[in-house]
Image (cartoon, helix red, strand yellow):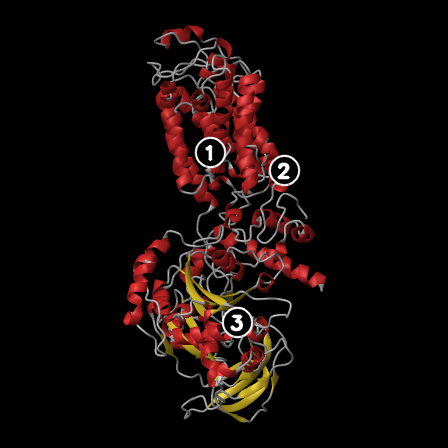
Amino acid sequence: MTELRSAPHERLGVSVESIMLNVVLALLPIALFSIWLYGLSALALLITSVVVCLATERVFNRLSGQSSTLSDWSAMITGILLALVLPPSFPLWMTAVAAVVAMGLGKILFGGLGMNVFNPALVGRAFVQAAFPSAIATWVPSYAPNRFHEFIPTTLTQPLMIPPDITAWVKAVSADAFTGATPLAMWKFQHQLTAPEDLILGIATASVGETSAMLILVCGLYLALRGMLDWRIPVGMMGSAVILASAFHLYNPDFFPPPVFVLLSGGLMLGAMFMATDMATSPVTPLAVWTYAILIGVVTVLIRYFGGLSEGVMYAILFGNALAPLLDRSLPTRVFGRRKPWRVGS
Amino acid sequence: MERREEIEAPGALPSRQDGRPSRPFRLSSYIVSLFRRKSFARGVHPDTHKSTAGKPIRRLPYAPRISLPLAQHIGKPAVPLVRPGEEVVRGQPIARADGFLSVPLHSPVTGRVEAIRLHPSASGAWVESIIIRAYDSSTQEVLWREPRDMEALAPEEILAAVKECGMVGLGGAAFPSHVKLSIPPERRIHTLVVNGCECEPYLTCDHRTMIEHPADLLRGIGYAMRAVGAQRAIIGVEDNKPDAVAVLTPLLPADGRVTIEMVRTKYPQGAEKMLIKSLLGLEVPAGGLPLDIGVVVNNVGTLTLLGRLLPAGEGLTERVVTVTGPAVKRPGNFWVPLGTPIRHVLQCSGALDGEAHAELEVVLGGSMMGQAITSLDAPVTKGVTGILVYDREWISRETATKVYPCIKCGECVQACPMGLNPALLGMLAAKRDYDSMSADYHIADCFECGCCTWVCPSGIPLVQQFRVAKGLLRARAA
């Protein structure tokens, strides 16, 4: 008897592993740059986040009697992304909590790879934002002179303990007047704008990986060129945010910041390139993809301008994630030779 | 450009045998057309593997024994006209059509009818077949023909002649050609689309046919145009076959009713609906036929053989088959008499040298839609475009990939030429929600091209699930 297989007999050969591995590779330069900026603390944060994410997935695999799913690299991506959206001074034990929540609640509870509704890293981030509001709003300056010799004092906080006050430490390590606020918070609460070049090069105060807009752009471009990232999502998201911000800026240039500031500050770039594009939690039909991307961009700007928080990317993406399945069903593809694409069952 | 042609035209152009002027192939216009190549939306770009494109069509030694299934076409099986023990000559009708949706069969060899009995077929089923043993000493010339004057025939007479020669769609569908060319009186056909795309990887039989038998092809196009009453014909060729275009262009009739158009090399460009969209910008309505929008599509292989067989008054007894694939040592294109066992073809092309059969996968057709066969005793039938043989090494590489859950990457949505949502359909198939697949997401429109499965990074057998779902839905409807 000869071999029998069903057509097609050949395939493209791009696998889930290769896509995920490439995402990891694209995130590495961003992670390395953050270690350069924040030193040991950023390194410890990344390691903690990745190790706890991998361990959580493995433990749940064991509990549910599955074979290990670590080889698909997706837990690694969640680990890296989670570390990149936390502040560099974030205590390691809180990072571990965030990682357990990200993998357990954000991914495995839904059924693992491909089944999750929300971006796991953002679920972890949202959890600690609510649980530890003070620690997640504590910012430290980059390029601290002693960053490769000692940790930021808060990093090694004992588990279940409140992190120590680091105002004195910050004053000691920062060269100029460091305000302890992110560019977005400075604009929102003190009405001060940060120079665009600082945002592009990544020396403004930010989360571990939300620093250099240019680096994130290059890494995202690599994935987009390899066809492993849906370019429509960053384009739609950043485009809609810029257009809406321009409209506000034109309406009242004194109050609303210029669009370039909106584009380069905070987590917009990282979110657009690596968070909103998470395949499992973004829609698939063309109309739904564009709607999803534009919606996230708009909601981000609205939260930043009119919400209680200075940053809105995280909640905007989670909001988009929640809508993604609905968008896919209500904005289906137009089938060849048929009309009325927007009405299912017609 | 136009003016140059006018100046050069009188007497300067190369002329065909019948003395009519023709248009030369121009490299400049070819290059210009490269930048505005017609195509359809989505689709995929698999490796074409067309290594046999440069190999002229050759003949194989005759197999000592052939088996002709009575059902080599879509429709009712033919009814045998011969009995076991009877002598037949090559070209002799040995089975008649049973009704409108059926075609007759002609003996591909001169020899003796051994039996009419069940014999393995490509699908795995044993089917009623006429078994003929070829005479060793025969020259195997066609000895049964009734030449006819095609110019004198009315459209209905052309259709009758098409049916009489046993022609079916040679692009793989094996749908009776006279049925496809029969136009209901309330329909008007404006264009005959001639499908020379051959978008399936590995296959080059149509490509070689266009290069080696262009005059037959153009004659066949003329007959088909008269049969359907079309005022123009467009030959659609993928742009990876400029040599075929170069051969055909100077031979096109001077009245300009037959044109040749290059379309982008993209799978599945050769699917009927896609090619019509590419060439004419028209969409065949869902569930409809091309003739609903005034178009009839025929494959170049079919029309070439019609152009040869109709005036000669011969029946369809052989076809061009591409034999290729990683396991084939001497790949090429061959005129293969119908009924030839696939084992014989593979032996002649060196696919069975030294290797155990269990190590091979034999596929009829190309790599995207071809069907793997269970028995090498199955014969080449009218719908076999190619024989593709994979070796163990290749199979292991292709089957090594792990199957993951759907990660909703949307690659299948961006590949599906029909604009379906294979990701969602796959999830519904996994839940066995066939009603929703058909009512809400139009699974019936899927023509199983396999693009979704080809791109899927999770290795999900989407098109296989769709085949199962469509089969179940059909069974339920019946």
Q: Which residue is mark 2?
A: A326
Whether tag 1 and tag 3 are in contact, CB under 8 A, the answer is no
Asked whether, in this view, residue B163 is left or right of residue A152, the answer is right
Q: Between marks 1 and 2, how big is the CA–CA gap? A: 21 Å
Earlier residue among tags 1 and 2 = 1
Query: Residues at badges 1 and 2 in contact (C-beta under 8 Å)?
Result: no
Q: Tell me the SS state at disc 2.
A: helix
Subunit that carries the residue with mark 1: A
Under mark 2, the amino acid is Leu
Q: Which residue is mark 3?
A: B169
CA neighbours of label 2 inside 10 A, class few (<14), some (14 to 19), many (20+): few
Question: Can residue A59 be seen in this snapshot?
Answer: no
Q: Quadrant of residue A282?
A: top right
x%, y% of residue B14? 30, 72
Disc 2 chain ID: A
Residue type, numbered disc 3: Gly
Q: Residue A250: horizontal and vertical position, in percent?
A: 48, 19
* Chain containing mark 3: B
Identify the residue position indicated by label 1 in the image: A235
Residue B1 placement (x, y as % from top left) = 32, 58
Whether tag 2 and tag 3 are in contact, CB under 8 A, the answer is no
